[in-house]
Structure formats: C-alpha cells, structure tokens
Image (spheres, helix red, strand yellow):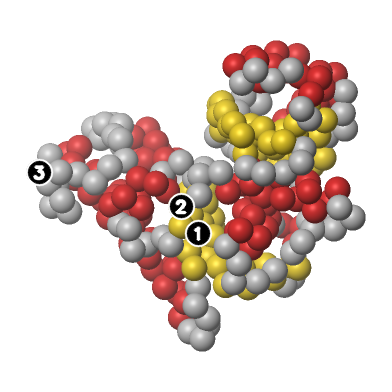
C-alpha cells in the first residue's frame, strides 16, 4: 500500500494526516505540540512512532505535502522528510497552480493554512462560503465558488484566555465552556467563562453577519474547523452549518491530488 502524509504546521500544534495515494478519506491523524527547537532527527523518530502505531511502514510513504505558518520550522521538516522518507516535500504557497483564484490584491500575505482551508471547503462543500478556523488566531475566509475574496483575522480564543490569566494576577486560568450559571456569573471562574464564551459567540456571529450583509444576495454556508469549533457548535448549533475537524488535512490531500493530475 502506498500512502501520502499531509501535515499542517501551526503556531501551537502540528497535525499529521495519513491518506492512501489513490485518494479517499484521511485514514488516521495525529496531533503534537509545535516545538520550534526540535531537530529533524527528533521529528523523524517521533513521526515514525505515530506511523508504527497505525501499522504503516515508513517506506510506504511516497508523498509529503505540508502547510506551515512557522517559517523557521520548515527547513527542519524538509530535512526530516528527505532523510527519513526519501521523498521531496511539497510546501503549499499561493504561487503553486492551485484550484483557486485569488481575488485579493496581496495574495502573498494569505497564510497557507487559510489557502488550504479555502480550497478544501470549496471542493467539499461548494458555493458561497465563510470558512472559520479557530486556531492560534481566529481566521475568517470568504470564498465565492473557486474565488478567494479575503477575510478577517481576530485573536485566538485560547491565546486570549492565556493572556488574561498571565496579566491579571488575581484571575485564575479557566477552561473554555458555557458556565452553568449562564451569562450572569456567580463566581470569578464562571464570570470569566461567561465573558469568553458569550463574548466569542458574539464575535463570531457579528463577523459572519457582516459578511452576509456585504452581499445579501448570496446564500453563505459557514464551515468551521479548529479545536474549539465542535464545543461552540454544541452550545450554539445555529452558528455553523458544518464543523469539519479534518478540513486542513483534507485540503492538503486535495491539493496534492490536483497537482499530481496536471
């Protein structure tokens, strides 16, 4: 069996996805913290352990495609791929012949993760889309069919929570959740949870609505990904139309298959 690896390198986490060379779904995925000081050998051994847990031999990995928002980490990843998998890594960037048009004055500024998410959502869901990634930053991408129109970037939810805890000595770290007391907090912990939970719901809802107001003739579908998307969807099921935790990995696979067909 021949496989490909799709890797999403984010500021906080790196996610690996395994797929068959012949296409289909992401077979397995693994998540680890992005350690910028990790060596290529450490990363190679670490990834081999993941593959062994899935009964996959490293010699069966024939393709490696990745997106990265951590440029300093890219040479380490690429050396690991060449040394351990004896294949040439493919990094996603806007200058590749991608299945998307950039109706955007400065396409070189678009994060590769946003490009990959937009392509995945366009191919899988189609039509007019608002694609939201709740990662280290909260990103919004507006997609019209195969046209990337632009978007918005807000602070990441976990990053904001950690910053508040670090800078306010009397406020404890908390878990993101809808407090049992609702919006009216009955303790410091529940008050912080209320502010973050309902505040973030409001941020998401308002930006989505502003996109819809911008072009009221379009019927936008909202696609969400990222670690907290499912939790938010459980509490506010009217906010997102689809939650796809594998959206970025699927986008990388789609891009690989598209480029291989050219």
* Res 50 quadrant in image: top right
Q: Label 3: which residue?
A: 186
Q: Label 2: which residue?
A: 243
* Alpha carbons under labels 1 and 2: distance apart: 6 Å
Which residue sits furthest bottom? 217
Q: Residue at x 44, y 68 (%)?
A: 208
Do residues under tags 1 and 2 come within 8 Å of each other at their CB atoms?
yes
Q: Is residue 104 in view?
A: no
Do residues under tags 1 and 3 come within 8 Å of each other at their CB atoms?
no
| Mark positioned earlier in the residue sequence (1 or 3) | 3
Q: Position of residue 19 (x, y in %)?
A: 68, 36
Q: Label 1: which residue?
A: 223
* Alpha carbons under labels 3 and 2: distance apart: 31 Å
Q: Residue at x 75, y 34 (%)?
A: 4
**Of circles 1 and 3, which is in front?**
1
Q: Is residue 112 left or right of residue 177?
A: right
| Mark positioned earlier in the residue sequence (1 or 2) | 1
| Mark positioned earlier in the residue sequence (3 or 2) | 3
* Res 187 quadrant in image: top left
* Res 149 quadrant in image: bottom right
Q: Secondary structure at mark 2?
A: strand
């Amino acid at each position: 069996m021949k496989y490909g690896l799709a890797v999403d390198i984010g500021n906080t986490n790196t996610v690996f996805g395994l797929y068959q060379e012949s296409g289909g779904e992401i077979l397995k995925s693994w998540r680890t913290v992005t350690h910028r000081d990790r060596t290529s050998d450490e990363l190679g051994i670490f990834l081999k352990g993941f593959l062994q847990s899935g009964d996959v031999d490293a010699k069966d990995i024939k393709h490696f495609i990745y997106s990265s928002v951590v440029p300093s980490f890219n040479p380490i990843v690429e050396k690991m791929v060449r040394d351990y998998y004896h294949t040439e890594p493919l990094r996603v960037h806007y200058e590749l012949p991608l299945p998307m048009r950039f109706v955007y004055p400065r396409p070189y500024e678009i994060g590769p993760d946003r490009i990959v998410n937009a392509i995945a959502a366009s191919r899988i869901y189609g039509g007019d889309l608002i694609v939201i990634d709740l990662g280290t930053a909260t990103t919004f991408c507006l997609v019209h069919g195969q046209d990337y129109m632009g978007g918005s970037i807000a602070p990441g939810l976990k990053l904001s929570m950690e910053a508040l805890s670090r800078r306010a000595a009397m406020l404890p770290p908390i878990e993101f959740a809808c407090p049992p007391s609702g919006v009216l907090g009955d303790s410091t912990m529940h008050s912080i949870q209320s502010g973050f939970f309902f505040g973030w719901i409001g941020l998401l809802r308002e930006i989505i609505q502003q996109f819809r107001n911008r072009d009221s003739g379009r019927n936008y579908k909202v696609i969400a990904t990222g670690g907290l998307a499912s939790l938010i969807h459980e509490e506010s099921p009217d906010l997102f139309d689809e939650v796809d935790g594998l959206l970025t990995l699927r986008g990388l696979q789609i891009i690989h298959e598209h480029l291989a067909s050219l």
